Image (cartoon, helix red, strand yellow):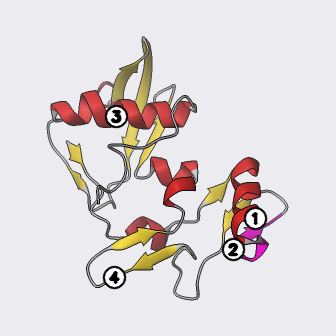
């Protein structure tokens, strides 16, 4: 398996982006409340009439995030979900170690940047640890888990 963001914008067009309270406050401070959609149970990014994230910008062959330097954690983690316990069958295939702890990493196969198969060394030793670090909150900066411009 390997993964690389190919800037297709699929995730920005098809998924609701839930925000943590600090993320919502930062976005409201920098852009205004009109870019968010608060509800009783959660905060999320507002969507355009075509369903895309209000911060998605497109060129003829690529999509860009207008929040690249303050991207919400949900966006940083997609297409992966990190869990401290197995969620689905064949847990051994999802198991990865980070800081001597076992985590289970699952991928949304709708992502066009995924290539299924035997995990590459870069995927195992660079990409997955970065995703786990972001999920745990011990890492903010993305080097491998975002599009490389």
Indicate the secondary structure of the residue bearing disc 2: helix
Q: CA distance from mark 2 to mark 4?
A: 21 Å
Q: Find out whether residue 141 is within the magenta segment.
A: no
Say which label, 1 or 2, has the lower sequence index: 1
Q: CA distance from mark 1 to mark 4?
A: 26 Å
Q: CA distance from mark 3 to mark 1?
A: 31 Å
To which residue does mark 1 refer? 28
- Who's the residue at 65% across and 74% down the image? 46
- Crowding at dot 1, Cα within 10 Å, few <14 / some 14-19 / many 20+, comes out as some
Indicate the secondary structure of the residue bearing disc 1: helix
Give the extent of the magenta segment: 33-39
Say which label, 1 or 4, has the lower sequence index: 1
- Who's the residue at 32% across and 57% down the image? 147
To which residue does mark 3 refer? 128
Indicate the secondary structure of the residue bearing disc 3: helix
In contact (CB < 8 Å): disc 4 and disc 3: no
Depth check, mark 3 against mark 1: the one in front is 1
Q: CA distance from mark 4 to mark 3?
A: 29 Å
Give the quarter of the image for residue 136. top right
- Who's the residue at 31% across and 24% down the image? 92
Q: Quadrant of the C terminus?
A: bottom left
To which residue does mark 4 refer? 59
In contact (CB < 8 Å): disc 1 and disc 2: yes
Give the quarter of the image for residue 125. top left
Residue farthest to the bottom, as pictured: 49
Residue 63 drawn at (x, y percent): 37, 73
To which residue does mark 2 refer? 35
Residue farthest to the right, as pictured: 40
Say which label, 2 or 3, has the lower sequence index: 2
Residue 84 in the figure: left or right of residue 88? right
């Amino acid at each position: 398996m390997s993964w690389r963001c190919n800037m297709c914008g699929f995730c920005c067009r098809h998924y609701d982006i839930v925000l943590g309270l600090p993320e919502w406050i930062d976005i409201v401070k920098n852009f205004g409340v009109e870019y968010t959609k608060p509800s009783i149970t959660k905060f999320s990014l507002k969507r355009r009439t075509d369903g895309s994230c209000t911060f998605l910008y497109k060129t003829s062959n690529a999509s860009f995030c207008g929040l690249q330097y303050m991207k919400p954690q949900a966006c940083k983690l997609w297409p992966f979900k990190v869990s401290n316990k197995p969620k689905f069958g064949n847990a051994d295939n999802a198991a990865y170690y980070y800081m001597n702890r076992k985590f289970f990493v699952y991928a949304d196969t709708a992502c066009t940047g995924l290539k299924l198969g035997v995990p590459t060394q870069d995927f195992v030793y660079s990409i997955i640890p970065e995703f786990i670090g972001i999920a745990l909150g011990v890492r903010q900066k993305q080097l491998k888990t975002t599009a490389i411009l």
